[in-house]
Image (cartoon, grey):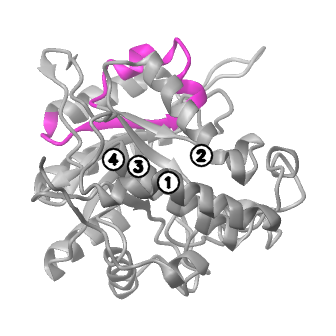
Amino acid sequence: MRLMAAPLLLALTLALSGAIASGKPSSDSLQQPGTRVGDTPRRPFASVQDGKWIGAGVSYGPHRDGQTPNTGPQPTDEQILEDLRIMSRHWGMIRMYASRGSAEQACRLIRQEKLPLKVMVGAWIAPEVIKKENTPDQPMPEAVIANKAEVEASIRLANEYPEIVIAVGVGNETQVEWSAHRSDPKELIGYLRQVRSAIKAPVTTCDDFAFWKSPASKAIANECDFIGLHVYALWNKQVLVDAMDWSRQTIADVKATHPDVPIVLTEIGWATKKGTEGYQAIGVVVVPDEREQELFYRALRDYSFQVDLPYFYFQAFDEKWKGGGSPDEIEKHWGVFNSDRTPKRVMMSEPAQTRVPIVKP
C-alpha cells in the first residue's frame, strides 16, 4: 500500500483541490431541505453557522486508559476539558453516544469555557426484548429503565443547551442485521417521536449503510430529520485507492433510497492497526497505518465540504477498552490521536481550522 501513497495523494489533490479554493460548497448538496416528518417540516442540520461551514466534526468517546463506560472511574471535568480544547482546534462539532454522564459534562464545560463546539447528543438504546429462534422472548426490564433515562436526559440536554446541541441521535446501530444490540423498530420509532416532540433540534437515528439501503429503513427514515449514516470502506474489503469512490457510491445508493431525506455521515473513518482474529482478519484486506489514515482523512474532508455533507469522523481518540484482549484489536485504533492524547500522523500536520468561510456568489 505504501507504493500507492504518492500517486494516490496526487490524484486526490487534483480531484479535490478546487473544493476549498472555491470558498463555497457545490450546489450539488446532500443537505437540501427534505419533505416532512409527520405534521412538521424536516428540521435542517445547521452545517453553516455565522457564515462559516462547521460540518467537519468528530466522534468522541471520553474514556481513557483504565476507564470504561459502565464500571470503575469515569472521566473527570479536567480530562474532558482537555479533550474539548484539543478537539475545538480541529473540528466545529462532536458526536457523543449517550446522554448521561460525560455528555452533560461536555455541554456544561463548552458553555462555561465558551468553546467553539457544537454537540450531537446521543441517547443509547438497548434491546428491551431479546428474541431468539425456538426460544421464548426474554423481556429486559433493566434496558427499558435505561432507555427511558437516556431519552429523558437527551431531551433535557437539548432544551438546557440549545446553543450547543446541534442534533440528537436516538440509538446507534440498533437496526442493522449484524448488530449486537438490535432493537425492535417500533420501540425505536416511539423514542424518536418522543424526543422530536420535546425539542427543537433535528433528530435522527444512526445506523450502517446496509440498513439504510434496505426497504425496512423507509419507516425509520420517515421519523427522522436526517439520515445518520455510517460508511466504512475499510470494513468492507476496500483498499485505500478505492476507498473514496466506494464511499461516494455508497452514499449515493442511500440517497437514491431516500431521495427526500438529507444525509449526515455520523461515522466514517480509517483505523491505524488491525488484529488477526474475527471479521477484521478477512473484512479488512489491508494492513492499515497512519499514512493511509492521513490520506483518507484529507480526501474525506475536502469532498464533504465540496458537496456540503456534514460528517463526524470516527474518531478523535483511541479507546483501549474496546474490542478483545489483543493490543492490535482494530476497535482500539480508530482515533486520530492516541489514547494518551498524543497526535497521530494526520494531526501532526493538520492545520487548526474548524470553520471554513462561505463566500456567497
Q: Identify residue for label 3.
A: 304
The secondary structure type at the circle numbered 3 is helix
CA separation, marks 4 and 3? 34 Å
Q: Residues within 10 Å of mark 1 (few under 14, many from 20)?
A: many
Q: Earlier in the sequence, mark 4 or mark 1?
A: 4
Residue 33 on the magenta span: no
Q: Identify residue for label 1.
A: 300
Q: Residue at x 65, y 69 (%)?
A: 321
Q: Identify residue for label 4.
A: 149
Q: Earlier in the sequence, mark 2 or mark 3?
A: 2
Q: Residues within 10 Å of mark 3 (few under 14, many from 20)?
A: many
Q: Earlier in the sequence, mark 4 or mark 3?
A: 4
Of tags 4 and 3, which is closer to the observer? Answer: 3
Q: Are marks 2 and 3 in contact (CB under 8 Å)?
A: no
Residue 102 in the image: above or below residue 157: below
CA separation, marks 4 and 1? 35 Å
Q: Looking at this view, is 191 or 12 the one in front?
A: 12
Q: Earlier in the sequence, mark 2 or mark 4?
A: 4
Residue 199 on the magenta span: yes
Q: Are marks 2 and 1 in contact (CB under 8 Å)?
A: yes
Q: Give percent across and percent down for residue 161.
A: 14, 59
Residues shaded magenta: 198-225
Q: Earlier in the sequence, mark 2 or mark 1?
A: 2
Q: Residue at x 44, y 78 (%)?
A: 75
Q: Are marks 1 and 3 in contact (CB under 8 Å)?
A: yes
As shown in the figure, which amino acid type bears the numbered disc 2?
Met
As shown in the figure, which amino acid type bears the numbered disc 3?
Ser
As shown in the figure, which amino acid type bears the numbered disc 1?
Leu
Q: Quadrant of the N terminus?
A: bottom right
Left or right: 161, with 74 as reference point: left
